[in-house]
Image (cartoon, coloured by chain):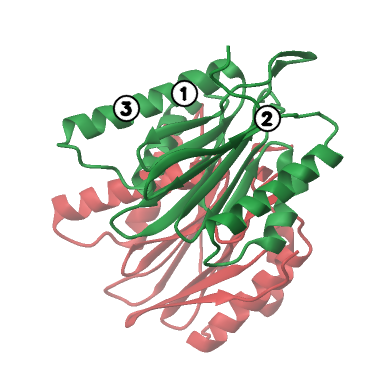
Chain colours: A red, B green
Amino acid sequence: MSILEYNGGAMIAMAGKDCVGIASDTRLGIQAMTVACDFQKTFQINSNTFVGLAGLASDVQTVSEVLKFRHDLYELREGRKMTPRVFSNVLSNLLYEKRFGPYFVEPIVAGLDAKTGKPFLSGMDLIGAPVFTDDYVVSGTCTANLHGMCETLYRPDMEVEELFETLAQALLAGVDRDALSGWGGVVHIITKDGVISRELKGRQD
Amino acid sequence: TQHTAMDSVLAIRYKDGCVIAADQTNARSVLAYQHNLDKVTELSKHTAMGVSGPNADMVNFSEYISKNMALYEAMNHGNKLSVNAQAHYVRSVLAEALRKGPYQVNLMLGGYDEKTKEANLYFLDYLASMQKVNFGCQGYAGAFCLSIMDREWKDDMTKEEALEVIDHCIGELGKRFVIAQPNFIVKVVDKDGVSVSKFGADPNDN
């Protein structure tokens, strides 16, 4: 039993044409037992950035609280919005601060650069080592499944509805072969005009 | 790694309040110290939490939280903390202690919010994960009772219906759980406060 697999979870973020999407399952489990089917793992940071946190549920909640604090204080002090790239660096810094006693979360960041409108994606490990991609990032207990689905279904420059469908199908198929993930899902698509969020209807097993 | 407590805590949220039940056995390994322990602590007039875990942590933690609730109300002109706020506070205490000296307590925190006129129930475990739920269990009880609650819980239940479901759960534990838990204490939290619905053995009988 690994601490990162204690509660279970699955997460994908994907880039589209001037839009970006992030999807997660909503299961909260204690090893094999499912406790809730509406656990939040994706958090809106500001109007153009989302963070998805997979891993130990307690740290998902703690890290999202600390992140929100650091982000909100930045915006108050600077008087301007935090860009997704800077946010990703703040998160990376937060995690590395705990290098020898880490938060057990493996986050993904999805955002839209306010000026250029270009999608931003990053993923990192529990001590904040980042990877920046232009197609998709995944995290959770079934990353192998999710990589397989994303690699197959992803195409560059998808519009909002296509991106939603791709994310939803990749997530649903990925979690169906993982005992610790699933029991519902949620997808958020960020565009310059706003955020569209939808709940997914999937297998409840 | 935590001490695997043999305690059962069951809780159900109904339309106007919460029912929280817990077994009354106080035991360590193969020795049972008592069968009339009250594991459901009143946190404030409108909230209670059922706690499972080693007796030391259970008592220490419950008292720490309930005293801090009383302190808050005393310092804030009698302003009450909402159930949501209390649950977040409990989570923050657990989260801070987690990497220092964790409280090995798993709990169900339930109450009734006068302001919004709704009942709220929260599941918290010793790692400080927290989730708002309609019903829940701590301990092995979940393996037997969650499916009963899944089947029988409905929106806008009455207190009597909730108490009946708790009875079904306690019955199931008595029938199929290998650890005999002869006594359960059942408390109700609603707009009138925390009251004892029934108990197997009187906690004050010492």
Q: Do the residues labelled 1 and 3 touch (CB within 8 Å)?
A: no
Question: In front: mark 2 or mark 1?
Answer: 2
Is residue A8 visible to the viewer in this orientation of the structure?
no
In the picture, the disc for residue B61 is 1
For marks 2 and 1, the one nearer the N-term is 2
Q: Distance between the residues labelled 2 and 1?
A: 16 Å
User: Which residue matches tag 2?
Assistant: B7
Q: What residue type is labelled 3?
A: Asn
User: Which residue matches tag 3?
Assistant: B68
User: For this rendering, which residue is in front, B161 or B59?
Assistant: B161
Image position of A149 with respect to B71: above or below: below
| In the displayed structure image, the side of residue B191 where residue B56 appears, left or right | right
For disc 1, the neighbor class at 10 Å (few under 14, some 14 to 19, many from 20) is some
In the picture, the disc for residue A132 is none
* Horizontal and vertical percent position of residue B179: 81, 29
SS state under label 2: loop
Which residue lies at the image location 49% right of the left edge and 25% below the top edge?
B99
* Horizontal and vertical percent position of residue B76: 17, 36
Which residue lies at the image location 47% right of the left edge and 18% below the top edge?
B60
Image position of B184 with respect to B129: above or below: above
Asked if labels 2 and 1 share a chain, the reply is yes
